[in-house]
Amino acid sequence: MEDIQLKDLWKAQEEKLDKTMKLNLFESLQKQRAESKLNRLVRLKVLAVILGIAWIIFMGILINGNQLKNIYFTISVGMIMIFNILAVAVYIKHIVLIRKLDYSQSITEVQKKLSRLQASTFNTRFLLLQTPFYSTWFWSSEMIKSGAINSG
């Protein structure tokens, strides 16, 4: 009778161990998938930061070359530059948020950080506000005086 109980106890323990190992394997795979996706996102954000900095430098060169000859051009490029500086700062913030994720924390803490990252990503829509400035950089004082812009 003791042998049967011992075997049943051994079998129950083995099943629990097997179940725990499967759960740990599943968690590990899920963690790897999440990290992989977030690492791809980081690479994309780093590329956006590099290209953004290059674009900002180009805009600075345009402003410097213009030397306030056309005030509309200078203002337009300056505003575009400001929006892009803000975007680069937001992308750097995203990279920091992703790098700060610690998967050993509780699920709710990780979810809070991920939702903060997602909300911040949606808030980059402010970049659309720069689009009107692309249409104003060819304006000139002569165009304004002659009414060429208003008669459109």
Image (cartoon, helix red, strand yellow):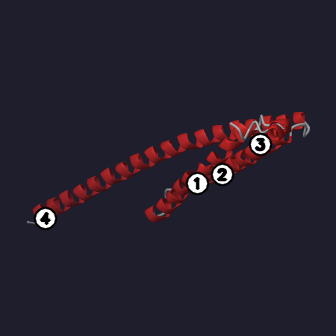
What secondary structure is marked by label 1?
helix
Q: Secondary structure at mark 3?
A: helix
* Contact check, label 2 and label 4, Cβ < 8 Å: no
Residue 152, quarter of picture: top right
Q: Which residue appears at 49% of the width and 56% of the height?
A: 103
User: Image point 86% across, 42% down: which residue?
Assistant: 71
Cα separation between marks 2 and 4: 63 Å
Q: Look at mark 2 in the image and give the residue it sits on.
A: 90
- Given residues 78 and 53, the one toward you in this image is 78
Closer to the chain start, of discs 2 and 3, is 3
Q: Could you tell me how far apart the alpha carbons at marks 2 and 3 are, in whole angstroms?
A: 21 Å
Q: Are marks 2 and 1 in contact (CB under 8 Å)?
A: yes
Q: Nearer the viewer, mark 3 or mark 1?
A: 3
Residue type pointed to by label 1: Asn
Image disc number at residue 76: 3
Quote the CA–CA distance across marks 2 and 1: 9 Å
User: Please, what is the three-letter code of the amino acid marked with disc 4?
Assistant: Gln
Q: Quadrant of the N terminus?
A: bottom left
Q: Nearer the viewer, mark 1 or mark 4?
A: 1
- Which residue lies under the disc numbered 1? 123
The label on residue 59 is none
Q: Three-letter amino acid code at disc 2? A: Val
**Residue 74 or 8: which is nearer the viewer?**
74
Mark 4 residue element: helix
